Image (tube, rainbow, N blue to C red):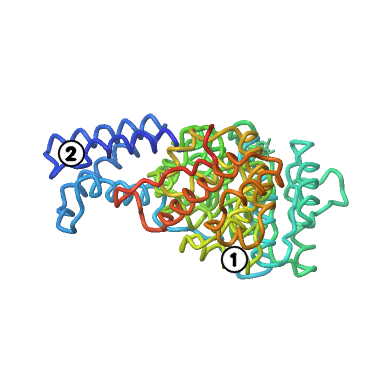
Amino acid sequence: MFESLTEKLNLTFKQITNRGRLTEKDIDETLKSIRIALLEADVNFKVARDFVSRLKNQLTDDLLAQGLNPSQHVIKAVDNELKATLGSFTSKLSEGTTTPSVILLVGLQGSGKTSTAAKLALYLKNLYNTSPLLVPADTKRAAASDQLITLAKSIDVPFYTSNESDGTPLEISMSALNQAKQDGTKWLIIDTGGRTTVDTELMEELQEIKKTINPCETILVLDAMTGQDAVKTASEFQQVTELTGLILSKLDGDARGGAALSVTAVSGIPIKFVGTGEKPEFLETFHPDRMASRILGMGDVLSLIEKAEAVVDEEKQRALEKKFTQANFNLQDLLDQIRVLNQMGPLEQIMGMIPGMSQMKNQLGTADSNQKRLSRFEAIVLSMTPRERNQPVIINGSRKRRIASGSGTSVQDVNQLLKQFKDMQKMMRQFSPNYSALRGRKPKLPKLFLKQ
Ligand code: GDP
């Protein structure tokens, strides 16, 4: 989502790399290009203006005393401001003082509310090892209820079914709450109705539910693709119903990111989660600091590890983390990691989380060609002996010929794979949660995924 902003900010930083010190003119020019980059990313103009003015104050402070060169100085200051604009700290879900804790999901039609209800249910189920109750209280859109029930079944989470077919959203919510109390359910997630625009009837309905049910969280789901309209919607909802948090859906889309960068600054409401795909597992906790790193093209290793956690068992996960940070892995591990990567989601998303890689996403091959390459790769590794997988250095000419014929590939393919494995090892050594970009190093994208 932030590719273009990342690219422009990095261009700006590049222009001042290798400078001894910045003149006033350099600072002005830098601030101007950062402001333009923000506006082009569809950031609210007031937010962009305040951002740049705070940045100016930071840049004139003597951070150089800390031993940073001008471009590092600017990157650090932009990083600080991005974090502040995105909300400074991670805002967690609050639990209620009584059981169940109720989450009321509100939003416009098509914002991703129903999908998000299922995403949250899966998130809570995995976190607490107990299923929440999903409540379809969107009576306006007939298909919404069926959609939520289908999603609930797909993630094996219970849903509330009303005895009366013509219950109002308030009546449905109240009966669901009673049922949850009786069953000792820990969390109740209510999917309320949406409209195409904010209207009085919708607001009254929400206020009524809120007053009666007393949810511990009232979360507005916003479609990040709608840009500044999402920011406007947040302000409108906030005026009428007190919101406790936001969830930005469709962050995987090709919107420019302005909504994500402006909405908290304008509305004062924290973003709690972001949706990064249609399926229930595509929900990520929103961490302003990690998002700032992603925007700066410095990757987000922690989120990457969390994504892996969701698909790898704990023991394997610990080994994976160790190997990620120690670059201590062999071909078998690499094969395991590739299989994990495949389960973690689209490669472009994963690459954006690896330090220094976000700008290289456009160099990736198509999903199809990547898949073919990975299958060939898998066949080659499977034709190796365990010793060869552990110590690729022993693979000499005759071993290469044997492996090639065993896997139905050529010696050239085997050579290529071994070269790519070496590149990958090199890259993994640069893998570090610390900002490698700040140290002026730029990891190269392993050829394994490059267009050939
Ligand atoms: P509602 O009307 O607010 O309940 O919205 P839905 O949950 O039905 O979502 C509207 C459309 O957006 C559906 O096609 C969803 O699959 C899609 N959608 C929801 N969240 C995401 C997301 O995070 N990423 C993508 N790509 N699509 C999403």
Marks 1 and 2: which is nearer the front? 2
Residue at mark 2:
27
User: Residue 361: percent from the left, percent from the top?
Assistant: 49, 37
Mark-to-mark CA distance, 1 and 2: 46 Å
Q: Amino acid at mark 1?
A: Glu
Residue for point 53% across, 54% down: 304
Q: Position of residue 293 (x, y in %)?
A: 40, 49
Give the structural element (helix, strand or loop) at label 1.
loop
| Residue that extends furthest to the front in the rendered view of this protein | 398
For the residue pair 186 and 129, the one nearer the viewer reads as: 129
Q: Earlier in the sequence, mark 1 or mark 2?
A: 2
Q: Amino acid at mark 2?
A: Ile
Q: Is residue 181 above or below residue 295?
A: below
- Residue on which the image places disc 1: 95
Establish if 9 lies above or below 100: above
- Please tell me in which quadrant of the rendered image residue 98 appears: bottom right
